[in-house]
Amino acid sequence: MRNGILAVVMLLAGCVAALADQAAEKRFVASVDSDGVQRVTMTGGEYYFDPGVVVVKVNVPVELRVKKAEGIAPHNIVLKAPEAGIDFAEELGSEVKVIGFTPTKTGNYAFECSKRFLFFESHKEKGMHGVLEVVQ
């Protein structure tokens, strides 16, 4: 009986952890506005990006509107994929920063906060990273 209860508790703990991971990795699929631009609003905060996965269409202009959430740590957003028409590194502040680009190649492209304080873990290592998925 005791082993059965322990198994149920472990199963429930695993389910809760899986749901927490899903919640932490929010996914946003951009739509094309009437003016032909895909607009994405993103927040960078204490070691996260929201959303953490962004899906856009290839060869359609993107307007990424990103700002820093409240907090004292400085953050940026960096995505270097010049082969796909995507190449930016921008500091985040309380005001919305608009980053424009047109992805020219499908694929998954990682973005991150490249900040690090002294010898501590980088913001990327603390979880402040995500993926831009460029699809047909």
Image: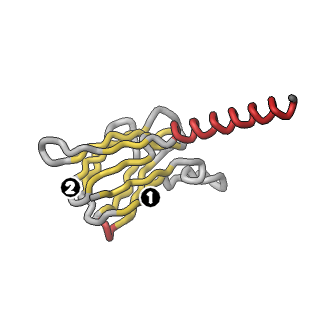
What residue is rendered at 66% in x and 56% in y? 119
Q: Residue at x 20, y 45 (%)?
A: 32
Q: Which quarter of the figure is the N terminus placed in? A: top right
Circle 1: is it few (<14), some (14-19), or many (20+) Cα within 10 Å? some
Q: Label 1 belongs to which residue?
A: 110
10 or 76: nearer the eye?
A: 10
Q: Is residue 20 above or below residue 120?
A: above
Residue 95 higher or lower than 52, as above or below: above
Does residue 79 appear in the picture of this structure?
yes
- Place of residue 69 in the rendered image (x, y in percent of width and height, measured from the top left): 45, 35
The crowding category of the residue bearing disc 2, from other C-alpha atoms within 10 Å (few below 14, some 14 to 19, many at least 20), is some
Q: Which label was assigned to residue 2? A: none
Of callouts 2 and 1, which one flags the residue occurring earlier in the amino acid sequence? 2
- Amino acid, disc 1: Ala
How far apart marks 2 and 1 lie (CA) works out to 19 Å
> Which residue is the extreme one toward the bottom?
83
The residue located at (25%, 52%) in the rendering is 100
Say which element carries label 1.
Answer: strand
Q: Position of residue 9 (x, y in %)?
A: 75, 31
> Which residue is outermost to the right?
2
Q: Is residue 81 left or right of residue 104?
A: right
Secondary structure, mark 2, is loop
Q: Is residue 44 visible?
A: no
**Mark 2, residue position:** 60
In this rendering, position of residue 26 left or right of residue 85: right
Q: Going by the picture, which residue comes out furthest to the left?
A: 35
Amino acid type indicated by mark 2: Val
